[in-house]
Every structure is written in C-alpha cells, then in structure tokens.
Image: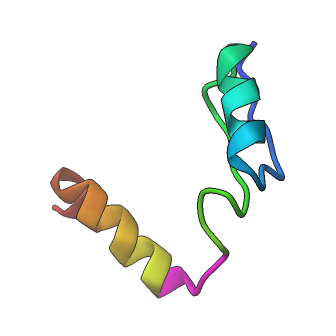
Amino acid sequence: MPAIAEGIETQDQARLLHDLGCRLAQGYHFARPGPVAEVDAAFLRLNPALAA
C-alpha cells in the first residue's frame, strides 16, 4: 500500500525513509508552503509538458 510520509524536516529523516523504501514524502525539508500561484509556476517549470 503506498504511503506518504509527512513532516519531513531533515536530510536524515529523508534518508531513513528512503532506506526503508518510502518513496513519497513531504515537509519543510523539501519545500516551505507558498502561495498557490508560486507553487503552480514552480511545478510547471519542473513539468513543462503539463502546461498545455
């Protein structure tokens, strides 16, 4: 069953989860919350094929 680890704040936490086989995570270690428009723009920069 897929699971998303939440509240990841350090590289050590991210590494441990990766080593345990958890491939989905979110938290301040990866990015701080932001305005929807900025998050959308950043996502589309990383995934330009979805802009169409």
- Is 36 left, or right, of 10 in this rendering? left
- Is 41 left, or right, of 18 in this rendering? left
Residue drawn at (78%, 56%) of the image: 9
Pick the residue in front: 19 or 32.
19
Occupied quadrant, residue 33: bottom right
- Looking at the rendering, the stretch of residues picked out in magenta corresponds to 33-37
Overall secondary structure of the magenta section: loop
Pick the residue in front: 49 or 27.
27
**Image height of 36 relative to 28, above or below:** below
Residue drawn at (60%, 57%) of the image: 30
If the image is split into quadrants, where does the N terminus sit? top right
Pick the residue in front: 10 or 33.
10
- Is 24 left, or right, of 52 in this rendering? right
Occupied quadrant, residue 11: top right
Image location (x, y in percent) of residue 18: 65, 24
Image location (x, y in percent) of residue 46: 28, 57
Occupied quadrant, residue 51: bottom left
Image location (x, y in percent) of residue 39: 48, 74
If the image is split into quadrants, where does the C terminus sit? bottom left
**Image height of 48 relative to 40, above or below:** above
Residue drawn at (61%, 26%) of the image: 23
Residue drawn at (57%, 87%) of the image: 35
Residue with the most extreme right position: 7
